[in-house]
Image (spheres, rainbow, N blue to C red):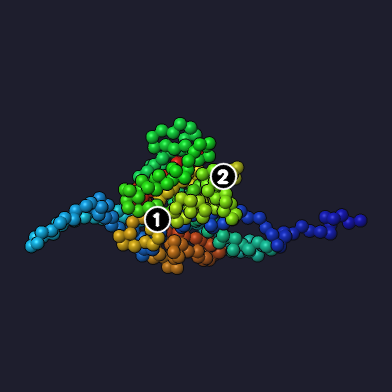
Amino acid sequence: MPLPGDVHVNAPLTNMSVAYIQDQKHFIADQVFPIVRVEKQSDRYFVYSREDFFRDEAEERAPGTESAGSDYDIDNTPNYYCPEYAHHKDVSDPERANTDNPLKPDEDATQFVTQKLLIKRERIWANKYFTSGRWGIDLTGRSSSPGAEEFLQWDQTGSTPVKDIKAKRLAIAEKTGFLPNVLVLGAYVYNALSEHDDITDKIKYTQKAVVTPELIAGILDIDKVVVAYGVVNTAAKKKTGSFSFIQGKHALLAYAAPNPGIKVPSAGYIFTWTGLFGAGAYGNRIKTFRMENLESDRVEGQMAFDCKLVASDLGAFFGGAVG
């Protein structure tokens, strides 16, 4: 009598496989600040003096006399440089020849490389914008008894996130003339706000009474709320994974220009080098070429960009917004 193992050979299921590919919407580096496409990998840009533009200097003029006049300063020292980031995955001839359905080595390699570049971009964005010591208003969350430049963490009883955010929105507007229009939240911070009485009490009589980023934006009177869900594993290969949200437990309130332009202020600008042949909007491209010495096809991804904090006075950072 044959055994089951003698008449059945295990084969991969052709209608499913398991791969931890993060949704690209979870990465927010291209959802906050405007993108400036540049043909040169490095160059300068100009910053006008805010103080000169806001000074009250017009005077009443008597007949036959000259008008009052003044000037403004321009700083031409700021610059950008778009380094190129790259990663590849080789697909060998034997691997392709022996691959079973539903595995698709070329498609899998493209997704794998793309994921690597998105994680790199997200971590650079977080390091440039989503950390303390960068912004004109820099606050630290405390679990109790907050002092100067501190606030009660938004997952604590008695905290006032709506009041905290609106107060800093007005503070930025008073100094710059621009009302912040975007709020970036770490995943844990969004989770705390979605259950906070400050928010839920204001929507309990709405049709669905379900908190969404759009509803929070409406309560705060800003254009959009962006929630960061991107995850990174910081452990070395073959080691137990160490996974965490890239953006941590922070929040950033900022003014982001709807579109980039000359004399258009924005807390940040993303410079992307599109001078590379075939490069997309983020200086990105995927190419495949033959590595005959390895008997493989190489799938290589590239990105060339620079995240520049242009106007620190147009942002307020809430570090450690939840515990």
Q: Residues within 10 Å of mark 2 (few under 14, many from 20)?
A: some
Identity of the amino acid at label 2? Glu
The label shown at residue 195 is 2
Q: Which of marks 2 and 1 is nearer the N terminus?
A: 2
Residue occupying the point 48% across, 51% down: 219
The label shown at residue 173 is none
Q: In which quarter of the image is residue 297?
A: bottom right
**Residue 169 image position (x, y, % from top left):** 39, 48
- Residue marked by disc 1: 256
Q: Report, in whole angstroms, how far the alpha carbon at label 2 lies from the one at label 1.
A: 27 Å
* Residue furthest to the front: 205
Q: Quadrant of residue 241?
A: top right
Tell me the element at label 1: loop
Q: Residues within 10 Å of mark 1 (few under 14, many from 20)?
A: many
Quadrant location, the N terminus: bottom right
**Residue 216 image position (x, y, % from top left):** 50, 51
